[in-house]
Amino acid sequence: MRLQGKLSEWDDARGFGFVQPHGGGERCFVHIRAFAARDRRPVLGDVVTYAVERDAQGRWNAVQVRFALQRGGTRNTPAGERKERGSFPRKSIALLFLVGLAALTAWKHWPMWLPATYLAASAVAFLFYRHDKKAAQDGRQRTAEKTLQLLALIGGWPGALVAQSVLRHKNRKASFQAMFWGVVVVNVGALAWLLQHVPR
């Protein structure tokens, strides 16, 4: 028998929490690996449907978990049917920046290591995001957020934007996003200062 409930506790960094069934009853432990769909991260307050089973210690665990409602209360739509028109254009921003920087480098005769550094740092940042999401799904040790922010600071933020869009990772956590965009501003400001002092 499947039940419906709400995530009453959720620790996203550690990938687990508790679901409280509607109408009362004993809450169940739930791990990120129990979610059937991995298209987005669970958040506190998500409404889910699930089955229950006991673990080796006799505790109730939620298994075969599926999102029932979006956080706003509307029925959940499969990932393939979601419209992307209203989403923030992270990939477009990243692509425009990288292409623009490469074009300006060729036009202004700036050092080629500038776009090369951004491209390499972006590739590394994307790999770190992918590794962190996989670790979260598997319940393994996560990559520290300060490491992800440092990669963005040294020029990997375009790759981080692509990862946030493609992998749907770290794109909903408000505190992380606030820090991330602050880092982007600092990086772009440092780039602007550097370009003013590049030997012609």
Image: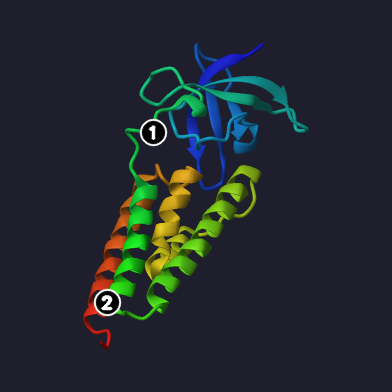
Residue 31: x and y in percent read 61, 36
Q: Amino acid at mark 1?
A: Glu
For the N terminus, which image quadrant? Answer: top right
Residue drawn 33% across and 60% down? 97
Q: Nearer the viewer, mark 1 or mark 2?
A: 2
Local SS, label 1:
loop
Residue 151: x and y in percent read 45, 66
Residue drawn 56% across and 52% down? 130
Residue 138: x and y in percent read 65, 45
Estimate the spatial distance between the alpha carbons at disc 1 and disc 2, rounded to whole Å.
36 Å
Local SS, label 2:
helix
Q: Residue 108, labelled with which disc?
A: 2
For the C terminus, which image quadrant? Answer: bottom left
Contact between marks 1 and 2 (CB within 8 A): the answer is no
Tag 2 or tag 1, which sits nearer the N-term? Answer: 1
Residue drawn 35% across and 49% down? 92
Image-quadrant location for residue 113: bottom left
Q: Is residue 135 above or below residue 24?
A: below
Q: Nearer the viewer, residue 112 or 195?
A: 112
Image-quadrant location for residue 54: top right
Q: Which residue is mark 1?
A: 84
Q: Looking at the image, which residue sits at the far right?
A: 56
